[in-house]
Amino acid sequence: MLEFLGSAWWLVVSLGILVTFHEFGHYWVARRCGVKVLRFSVGFGSALWKRVARDGTEYRIAAIPLGGYVKMLDEREADVAPAEAPRAFNRQSVWKRIAIVIAGPAANLLLCFVLLWAMFVVGRPDYAPALGGTSGIAAQSGLRAGDRILAVGDRETPTWMELQMALLPPALDHADVPLRVADREGAERTLALRLSALPADFDQRQAIQAIGLVPRHLTLPADIGRVMPDSAAWGTLAEGDRVTAIDGRPVERFQDIGPLVQALGERGGDAMVEVTRDGARHGFLLAPREITAEDGTRRWVLGIEPPQATTLPPKDALQRYGPIDAVPAAFKEVGHQTAQLFGMLARAFSGRLAIENTVAGPLTIARATHAYANQGVAWYLTILALLSLSLAILNLLPIPLLDGGHLLYYLIELVKGSPLSERAMVAGQYVGLALLACLMGLAFHNDIIQLVR
């Protein structure tokens, strides 16, 4: 219940900030273009507080805090006195109307930059992009436990989150990508990560796992937390033992045990399992047993489980800049994230991005904002900046009812030399409603899929 309430709270706060800032962009430019603004509302519904300024604009705070809106004088919506007609929105030149409409997405773009600048100044703590182990494609490409991935292509990866974000696009494209890597001693090398070998149907939400990267901060020590009754290890190994080697091959982490046991089971026979217990080294001859997993697959096991981890280790990386250096860093990040979002849109239309990963619904956004906010101010600024950028790009889509749809009307007006007919605009509104309904349906569908999973 607390998680639900927290998610709902952060969703309301986030949408309130983003949509209000978006509408303020329309309001600010409209005022400077000579358009009369009838109302600027923070929230929807009945007014909790309102004040009418000398110029006739009503400012209000409404009961439903999910954004806001700006109402301008417009002859298409109500009768306008002849003296006020020059200040009506519909009487403005096409260039002024374009400026007013584009101001909303521009405000969100500016907000994205400011939020990222603040995030860099505050400093975002994270984990270092260090590997605790590798398997599959990562191991075949030459990555090893203890490696630190410094860059993916030409993008620096100072933190684990940056590494994940840098690897996702080439993973979706099944494109090999160069990595700059430093080993435990600090020696750097370059290698090619063979993402073209990823299966066509890999889980796109778990790209890091599909590649075979195990982060150091999620690496479990090779300690035994529990021995399963009547298993191969029952009565021999004990809780608290640390496995150091299996069949002469060293074990550094609990994740190393599974592949070694599989190889031992396929070979057949006993093998020496070495452990440390109370500071002393011991060796036991054990033979794994084959079991059938819940998914029907068969595998070899010793019958041991790791301790139940309760907390993650402290974060060991910090992404921070001074106030001056944060300016170009924020500009660069806005450009990079914009390219990433347009790239994701292109992948969605081409089918390279799974439909359940295309559009996030309100439940997914609420859970994400809650999770980010729980990690601190810098993380919340990060998710708010990404949402602000997404809102700007979404509103620029050429769909009637969105800002991009209005821009499309005005561009057509520039080309043909006269406004679109009322009939064409009404038809466009219906098309826009249908497209938005489909978009909302897809968002809720994705929410349900995520909840089921």
Image: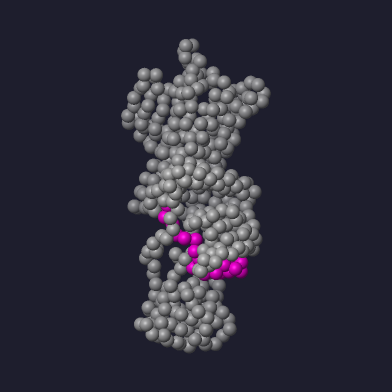
Magenta includes 105? no
Residue occupying the far left of the picture: 49
Q: Which of 450 and 395 is in front in this view?
A: 395
Residue drawn where x is 39% and y is 67% of the image: 309
Residue drawn where x is 53% and y is 29% of the image: 101
Residue 98 at what x, y percent from top left? Answer: 56, 27
Q: Nearer the viewer, residue 112 or 101?
A: 112
Residue occupying the far right of the picture: 416
Decide: is 44 above or below 300.
above
Q: Is residue 369 visible?
A: no
Residue 267 at what x, y percent from top left? Answer: 58, 83
The part of the chain drawn in magenta is 124-146
Residue drawn where x is 45% and y is 87% of the image: 283
- 98 sits to left or right of 283: right
> How many numbered markers are drawn?
0
Residue drawn where x is 58% and y is 30% of the image: 407
Residue 15 at what x, y percent from top left? Answer: 43, 40
Decide: is 75 above or below 392.
above
Q: Nearer the viewer, residue 422 or 62?
A: 62
Q: Can residue 184 be seen in this view?
A: yes
In this picture the colour scheme is one colour
Magenta includes 127? yes
Residue 368 at what x, y percent from top left? Answer: 44, 50
Decide: is 296 above or below 229.
above
- 416 sits to left or right of 220: right
- 170 sits to left or right of 28: right
